[in-house]
Every structure is written in C-alpha cells, then in structure tokens.
Amino acid sequence: MTPTDPALMSAETLIGLYARRALSPVEVLQAVLQRVALYNPWVNAFAAMNPQALRQAGESEARWMAGRPIGPLDGVPATVKDLLNLAGFPTRRGSKTTASTPAAEDAPAVLGLKQAGAVIIGKTTTTEFGWKSPGDCPLHGITRNPWNRERTPGGSSSGAGAAGAACFGPLHIGTDAGGSVRIPAAFCGLVGLKPSFGRVPQWPLGAFANVACAGPMTRTVRDNALLFSAMARHDLRDPFCLPDEPRDWRAGIEDGVAGMRVALVRRLGFEPPLDADGVAALEGAAKLLEEQGAIVEEADPGLPDTRAIFGRVWGVALARQVATTPAEKRPLLDSGLEEVAAREGQMLATDFLGAEALRIEAAHTMARFHQRYDLVLTAATPTAAFAADQPTLRPTEALWRDWAPWTFAFNLTRQPAISVPIGLDEHGMPRAVQLAAALYRDDLVLRAARALERAAELPLATPG
C-alpha cells in the first residue's frame, strides 16, 4: 500500500509526484518537519538542524514548476551524519573535545547530495568519533530507536538509523568503519549499504580511514541505489577514490538472483554469536533466495580470525585519536574509548604491521572465495536492538560479542556489503541479514537486496 503522508513516501515516489506537479518539495518538507517536531524530542536523531531547509525547498519547488530540476534528488529531504563536513555547520563528531567552528567545504558525499538537488534538513548524531555501536555520545546523549524507545538504534550512525525509521526524510548518509551503517540499518529496519572501498570519496579523513567509507541508509533498496548514485562520484580531493563515470545504480536492480551462487556463511574466521531469531532470519533469507532461483549452499571461506585483525585496527585508531586530543580535554572523552585506546596504545609497530598483513590475507581469501560464489549471505547482527540505556562495559569483548561480529570482516576486505531487513521478531523489532559481493560488485549486492525486499516487505515503524 502506498502511503498518503508525504513524510512516509520513498524518494522515488516523491520525484514522480514532483514531476507531475502533484506534490511540492515545500509540502514534503513541512510534513517531515511535523514528524521531527512530534518525535525527535525523545528520538534525539539530530546534532543540528538546517535553518535554510525551507528556503531551499522553496527554490526546488520553483525549479520543478519551471520544469528545470537540477538533479535526480531535487527537493528530496536528506540528512548527513555528523562525522562528515557540511559547509556552514560544525563537524562535532559527537565529542565535547571538538571545535564549534563551521566547516568551510562539503565532504564529497555531501557535495554529491547538493549537486543532485537534495534538501539537507540537518546533521544526525553519531557515537563519539564513530567508535562504538551503542547509540549514545558525550555531546548529544542517547539516541533512541523509533520502533521502541527503550532500545538503541545502533551506531555509530545512530541518528541516521533513527531518522530513517522515524521517517524524518527518505535519504540518510552514514559512515561505516566496522558496521556503522549496517548495524543501525539492521536495528531500525532500514537498508544500509557499505560500498566498495574507494567508491565514495573520503575527505577529510576520519579516525578509521583505511577501512571506512560513507554509505546510504534508506527505507527501500531502490532509494538506496538512487542515493548511492549521488554519493559515488569521483572527487579530486581523495586521490584514492575510483575514477568512475557517473552511473545510475538502479540499472539492473530488478534482474533478480536466478542462477547466482550464494554461500551461506556462519564463520568469519571465528563463530560470531547469533540468537535463535537471527538463525531463523538467516535461514529464511536463504530460502527466499532459493525460491527466486539462486543456488544456495553453506560454505566457509577459511578466513583468519578477523577479531584479532580488526581489534588491532580499531584499537590503534582510537589510541591515535586519544593521543592527538589535547591533554586538558581528554577527561571529556567517552571513558570506553579511552579504555580501548589504553589497552591497544602500547602495541608494537611490528604487531600492527602484522595485523595489516592479515587484513590483506583476508581480502585475498575472500577474492578467491568469490571465484566460486557471486554472493555471501550472513547474519547482520547477533541480536535485535538492545537496551538504549545500558552502560558500555568491556568494549573490546563487546565489539565481537554484541556489536559488530558479523560486519567488521567486510571492512577489512573492503568489499561491498548490505544490510537488508527480513522480518520482525516476537517483540516487533526488526531483524536483518547481510549480503556481500566481490570488491567493486556493488551492483550484485543491490540486486540481491532488492530480490529479498520484494519477497519480505516490512511495515514502517510506528514511533511511540
């Protein structure tokens, strides 16, 4: 059933209505802002709101009335995670240690949004420097899950996940260094894509630049591909980004999975935990793919222990973050961040280089695995969203036990991976699965995600 409230509509639906003069960007923004006023006081998805959004929606309306939209997202409401620069706004990164000086230039993904005509309504919350999966930070406090205010939306793209589930616009940009797009997408019933490394330019670099990238978070797969098309544009400020020609990533997205070979994977160099509902979701997704013609079989890629590799990459990045924070401001940092930094900060250079060698070994292993399999199917998270108010205890253990055991391997290998909602558990909370493909085959994960979406359509969240 197509929603009648503009705030609940997909970006594709909005663009079609704009083109027919059946709806205006101003009307859509007003509907979205009404939901923000109603639900954000407890959802707490925003780090900052854009006071120019209504004016920008009006300019978009004038362009549509003249038949001259500037891009494929003209007038569509969108948000940007507060780890990315949005010109004119400070990039606080969820931290009390950062400056309130406005950024002078847009990050590449943000520039892509603007060039496509999107109306950016605000910046969304993040865990401090994107370091963890529970959705809280020292600067903005706790962000809550619109499906259940007692649960976390996940992180580190906590505000993006919550904003997407609360229908604060259809398009949201997050970032993902170990699962920070896919985890909140899974907890909030969204589609979250971690693209191939280099597909979306990075500038300036964040704490986890070697394994991180920006990614789209949306309520539908087609919207995800549409937003990805605006983000994945070459930018000279990142000399390591791919020199891609602009493309519409929706092309071929309806082609299905018939004949594809899919590996159902339960080990990623160790056995990530997974509850009974997660097992059911994973096996249900495998069956849905088989019913659409995919060839699914259980397989083990034979990865090295990815916990040991990612733990060192993560720990060294956080140790560097603490070391570059002025001593007088360090007491303002999240205590868990400091705990991990202190544990890993004395690592020898040879140990870190050894972890990097193992990261490359993992990437080679998955490249060989994808010679046999088009896609990998795994769980996305060990459980449904956990309590929003629980303290962060033993973060190094929590990383591979509670937060990101199913996601961080694909940051190490740099291949594309997507979280797709597959159903609701007995408590009415979303469950998701993850699909991965060989490096640079972002098109395949989008195709397979769309196939699952067609087979397992979910309702929208009802905040309360």
Image: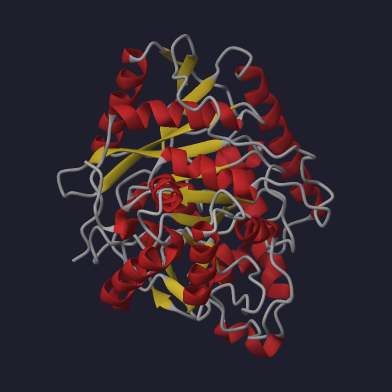
Q: Nearer the viewer, residue 152 or 73?
A: 73
Q: Is residue 87 left or right of residue 20?
A: right
Q: Pick out the residue farthest to the bottom.
A: 328
Q: Is residue 392 above or below residue 103?
A: above
Q: Is residue 93 visible?
A: yes
**Residue 364, image quadrant:** top right
Q: Pick out the residue farthest to the left.
A: 426
**Residue 317, image quadrant:** bottom right
Q: How is the image coloured?
A: secondary structure
How many numbered marks, from 0 up? 0
User: Split into 4 quadrants, where in the image is the C terminus?
Assistant: bottom left
Q: Is residue 429 above or below residue 410?
A: below
Q: Pick out the residue farthest to the front.
A: 66
Residue at image coords 61%, 18%: 369
Residue at image coords 41%, 68%: 26
Q: Is residue 389 visible?
A: no
The image position of residue 239, as x and y in percent, is 84, 50
The image position of residue 155, as x and y in percent, is 45, 59
The image position of residue 162, as x and y in percent, is 37, 62
User: Split into 4 quadrants, where in the image is the N terminus?
Assistant: top left
The image position of residue 39, as x and y in percent, is 27, 72
Q: Is residue 403 left or right of residue 375?
A: left
Q: Is residue 306 left or right of residue 313?
A: left
Q: Nearer the viewer, residue 244 or 413?
A: 244
Residue at image coords 49%, 43%: 224
Q: Is residue 69 above or below residue 289?
A: below
